[in-house]
Image (tube, helix red, strand yellow):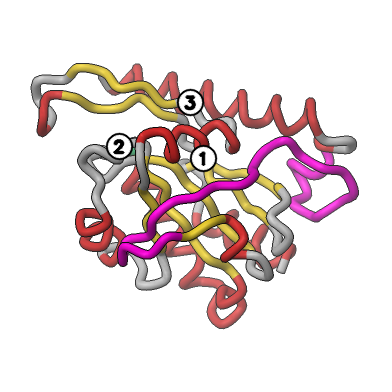
Amino acid sequence: MKWRIAALVMLSFLLGGLVAMAVLPGGRDRLFSGLPTAGKALVGGPFSLVDHTGRKVTDKDFRGRYMLVYFGFTYCPDVCPSGLQVIAAALQKLGPKADRITPIFITVDPERDTPAQLAEYVKSFDSRLIGLTGTPQEVDAAAKAYRVYYKKVQDEKSTAGYTFDHTSIIYLMDPSGTYVAHFSHTTSVDTLAERLAKVL
Ligand code: NI
């Protein structure tokens, strides 16, 4: 399974880059500089979900704040924990500057990832991390808005007999909800912290 995860991760990161370059005027510069430029990306958009405290939230609740958006699921064995650890460590490294950022984890597995399950999970990474779930339709709409691919696959070794293939992209969105840059769970903590510091 390892090669499959690695291949999916590489593919998803490349696809994310291609999408960003295709839809952004000057997207190539933005990808590598991490600095905001003019132009509107087609990544991101409205979502309506439930947070890990059970509260209904939409994308508008995060206006005025930078968002780091990552899709995954709590039963993910390695990729999601790596991604969330990178986010948590980078925020830690940024210090008070990180107060302008809300890290968000959106599940692609709403069947198992209830608000209660997410609450337990997110607090193990960072107290600022917000877990979001919803109906399968709401989750699907959010994933589509962020151009996130996910697919349920059978796996006898996993709890409930299934797991998910999914893209592993960390999206940085600005206070107006517009795409700024993207990273992956393989981005180093130093790189992510530096790029965020430049944007903030
Ligand atoms: Ni995962």
Disc 3 residue type (three-letter): Tyr
Was residue 200 drawn as part of the magenta stretch in this picture? no
Magenta stretch, main secondary structure class: loop
Q: Position of residue 112 (x, y in %)?
A: 20, 41
Q: Is residue 54 left or right of residue 120?
A: right
Q: Earlier in the sequence, mark 1 or mark 2?
A: 2
Q: Is mark 2 within 8 Å of ligand 1?
A: no
Residue 42 falls in image quadrant:
top right
Determine crowd level at label 2: few under 14, some 14-19, many 20+ residues with C-alpha closer than 10 A: many
Q: Position of residue 122 (x, y in %)?
A: 31, 60
Q: Earlier in the sequence, mark 3 or mark 2?
A: 2
Disc 2 residue type (three-letter): Asp
Q: Position of residue 180 (x, y in %)?
A: 72, 50
Q: Secondary structure at mark 3?
A: loop
> Would you place residue 85 above or below residue 5 in this image?
below
| Quadrant assignment for ligand 1 | top left
The residue that label 3 is drawn on is 149
Residue bounds of the magenta highlight: 28-56
The residue that label 2 is drawn on is 109
| Distance of label 1 from label 2 (alpha carbons) | 12 Å
The residue that label 1 is drawn on is 142
Residue found at x 61% / y 77%: 97
Q: Earlier in the sequence, mark 3 or mark 1?
A: 1
Q: Nearer the viewer's eye, disc 3 or disc 2?
A: 2
Residue found at x 37% / y 37%: 108
> Would you place residue 38 above or below residue 154 in this image?
below
Which quadrant is home to the N terminus?
top left
Q: Is residue 42 left or right of residue 75?
A: right
Residue 101 shows which numbered tag? Answer: none
Residue found at x 51% / y 25%: 10
